[in-house]
Amino acid sequence: MFQFDTLGQEIVEELSHLIQEQVILTDRRGFIQASTDPERLNQFHEGALLSLREKKILHMTDKELNQLQGVRKGVVLPIVIEGNPIAVLGITGDPQHIHPQAQLILRVAELFIQDAMKRKQKEEKVRDLEFFVFDWLTSSNKDIRFRERGAVLGIDVNIYVQVAVIEVMNTEDQFTIDEVDSFKSNQNIHPDLQMIRWGQDKILILLPDMNQDMLKSELEYFLLSIKRRKKIIVAAGIGGKTDCFNLSKSFLQAERAANASKKLNRVLFEHELRFELILQSIDESTREEFIQRTIAPLLEDRELLHNLQVWFNENQSMQNTAQKLHIHKNTLSYRLQKVEQLTGLSVSNVHDVLLLYFGIRLLDERK
């Protein structure tokens, strides 16, 4: 269906710049829906109605001005798409002056509309697919009608066993429908994969059964191509294999892996998650309480906190940590003793060291 409220006004404005004349666009009833002259909106144009019925260009001369309602001197041109008249274009001015350009102007308008209608059809198809996948991953009721609905969209649901999630690192970055369509057309991961937007900052990939090493390799290359084309950084996680009826499980795993991927800066399979699996299962209030019970006293002494972080990063090596901090080992030893005094946790006790490390990681997550 032609959208006069958006596309119609865009057409009349573009054409008025092209021919330097006033332009109107009427619906099939002859009522003006878009115009370079706002005062003419919603007025009846009898000449447009006649042009649409006869499917031909008509001149509005002095004679027509006296006989027909709502017309001005100029030319009216029926816009016919696939044999169906959908609107009428009206151009004010001397009909003899306008007529030589009429066919060209009409063709420009028809191409404009055809392109817009194709875009709209494409967007509707994409939305149908997005809604279907949303139901697929969130609804527990999947029967024969679910398969039939997929078939209508050209999807054999039985072949999909795995989900990958791609997510932008900066939430201000977004994916458009055209970008995702282009990504899908140019990817080499698998010829039968399905790719949709999940919100505007994620891409969801439904995958048939394939070699996992190849999947990871091709997905890494795919992320590089996104980075080059959009100048953005993305993370990616891959869920485990399942069957088409339990694909939601793989999706949740992929989201978990993508979240960890943001911090580790590499493509992650969910089964690779270890410590991150524990971190992601802890709610915010528990995290804050744990920080308060472990490393909170160090938050007022950034130097001590930084020294402890480097000590962990250097695998608790006194020599490597001292070199990294450009201090003497004795100075480092003194500072670690101060950490013990403030926190009540010993850096030589495995249990206490684990608590300190966990507190540091939770603090990093909060940042």
Image: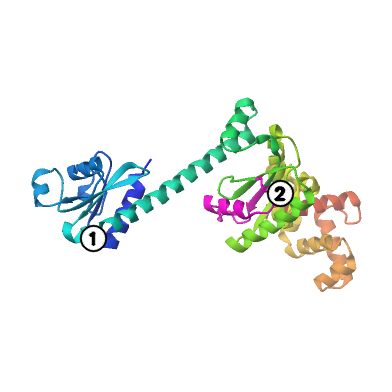
Q: Nearer the viewer, residue 4 or 203?
A: 4
Residue segment shown in magenta: 165-193
Disc on res. 100: 1
Place of residue 282 in the rendered image (x, y in percent of width and height, measured from the top left)? 73, 42
The residue drawn where x is 30% and y is 58% is 104
Amino acid type at image mark 2:
Gly
Q: Secondary structure at mark 1?
A: helix
Of callouts 2 and 1, which one flags the residue occurring earlier in the amino acid sequence? 1
Amino acid type indicated by mark 1: Pro
* In the displayed structure image, the side of residue 26 where residue 190 appears, left or right: right
Circle 1 Cα neighbour tier, 10 Å, few/some/many (<14 / 14–19 / ≥20): few
Based on the displayed image, in which of its 4 quarters is residue 325 positioned?
A: bottom right
Answer with left or right where residue 242 lies relative to residue 149: right
Quarter of the C terminus within the rendering: bottom right
Q: Which residue is rendered at x = 83% and y = 49% of the image? A: 355
Q: Magenta stretch containing residue 62, yes or no?
A: no
Read off the residue under disc 2: 237
Q: Nearer the viewer, residue 169 or 73?
A: 73
